[in-house]
């Protein structure tokens, strides 16, 4: 892969970094409110083994659905259901259950009825914050650290060796399920229809996992130590900056594994926090 001296494309980096920060901050705030309201509980987190088992079974179920029931209708329904669950969790932090369901459905209806890039991104970030809140309060940081390292290596294999991650993303895009933050190269791109958004066509895509996973970890750490969560969040910011610089260094833009630098930054931040006693 040919490289060049990297420079920061602020039009792309700032929206991506802001999205990550919002997922982490909003997720942590929502998690704190949900715990106080006893909507969710952080009292008995899953063990590392139990969480890995649940995660593996959930991932297998998702892959089976996408592999054998991968019609446009099924994939879209799965996507919208996931978005709704995240939105509902987030809104329940500030509204009663019934009102939260109505609000979440209203946001989802806007996303479906007005599928513009900016609407998609705002909806997705809010949903990911809700997911981060729900999962982060239930899983200890140690279990998540193991998972993040595993998924970082998996991302490398899936993108550079087997290429199946690239194939899967392209297939999902063709079916209208955009499991990614969409960042346009130009300001006018924010109001363009989501259907025209594709890598190499004036848009950069950042996978939902690249935002959700560090978000979940920061929320989990925040339940134990807000100070350590802050430093972990700063580490994730440096990680996404590293991802951006690596991407910018390519002479010919190709899909890349974005998760490893983000995971490295997040976990280094966490280790620094632990070393200084936070």
Image (cartoon, helix red, strand yellow):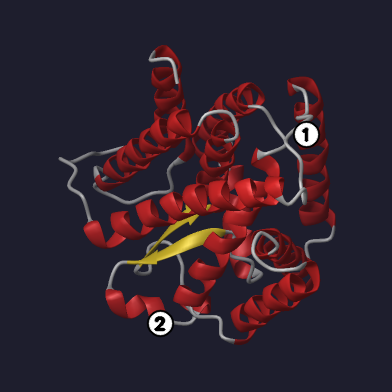
Quadrant in which residue 143 is drawn: top right
Which residue is at the far front?
36
Q: Residue at x 44, y 41 (%)?
A: 258
Labels 1 and 2: the sequence-earlier one: 1
Position of residue 186 in the picture relative to residue 53 (left or right): left
Tag 1's secondary structure?
helix
Q: Looking at the image, which is closer to me, 221 or 125?
A: 221
Badge count: 2
Task: Point out residue 263 in the picture as x, y percentages from the top left corner.
Answer: 47, 32
Q: Looking at the image, which is closer to me, 237 or 148?
A: 237
Quadrant in which residue 51 is drawn: top right
Crowding near the residue tagged with mark 2, few <14, some 14–19, many ≥20 C-alpha atoms within 10 Å: few
Which residue is at the far bottom?
113
The image shows residue 46, relative to residue 177, as above or below, that is above
Q: Residue at x 68, y 39 (%)?
A: 137
Q: Residue at x 61, y 46 (%)?
A: 32
The image shows residue 127, relative to residue 48, as above or below, that is below
Residue on which disc 1 sits:
56
Q: Looking at the image, which is closer to me, 273 or 83?
A: 273
Q: CA distance from mark 1 to mark 2?
A: 37 Å
The quadrant of the image that shows the N terminus is top left
Residue on which disc 2 sits:
191
């Amino acid at each position: 892969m040919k490289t060049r001296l990297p420079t920061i494309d602020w039009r792309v980096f700032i929206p991506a970094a802001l999205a990550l920060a919002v997922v982490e901050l909003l997720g942590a705030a929502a998690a704190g409110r949900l715990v106080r309201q006893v909507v969710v509980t952080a009292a008995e987190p899953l063990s590392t083994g139990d969480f890995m088992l649940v995660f593996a079974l959930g991932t297998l179920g998702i892959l089976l659905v996408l592999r054998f029931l991968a019609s446009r209708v099924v994939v879209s329904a799965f996507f919208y259901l996931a978005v709704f669950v995240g939105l509902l969790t987030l809104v329940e932090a500030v509204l009663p259950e019934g009102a939260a369901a109505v609000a979440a459905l209203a946001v989802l209806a806007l996303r479906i009825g007005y599928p513009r890039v900016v609407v998609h991104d705002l909806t997705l970030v809010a949903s990911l914050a809700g997911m981060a809140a729900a999962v982060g309060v239930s899983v200890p940081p140690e279990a998540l650290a193991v998972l993040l390292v595993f998924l970082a290596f998996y991302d490398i294999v899936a993108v550079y060796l087997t290429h199946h991650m690239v194939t899967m993303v392209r297939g999902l895009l063709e079916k209208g399920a955009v499991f990614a933050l969409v960042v346009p190269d130009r300001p006018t791109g924010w109001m363009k229809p989501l259907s025209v958004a594709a890598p190499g066509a004036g848009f950069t895509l950042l996978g939902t996992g690249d935002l959700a996973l560090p978000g979940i970890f920061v929320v989990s750490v925040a339940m134990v130590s807000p100070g350590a969560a802050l430093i972990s969040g700063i580490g994730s910011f440096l990680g996404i900056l590293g991802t951006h610089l690596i991407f910018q260094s390519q002479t010919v833009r190709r899909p890349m594994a974005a998760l490893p630098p983000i995971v490295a930054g997040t976990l280094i931040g966490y280790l620094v926090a632990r070393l200084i006693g936070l």
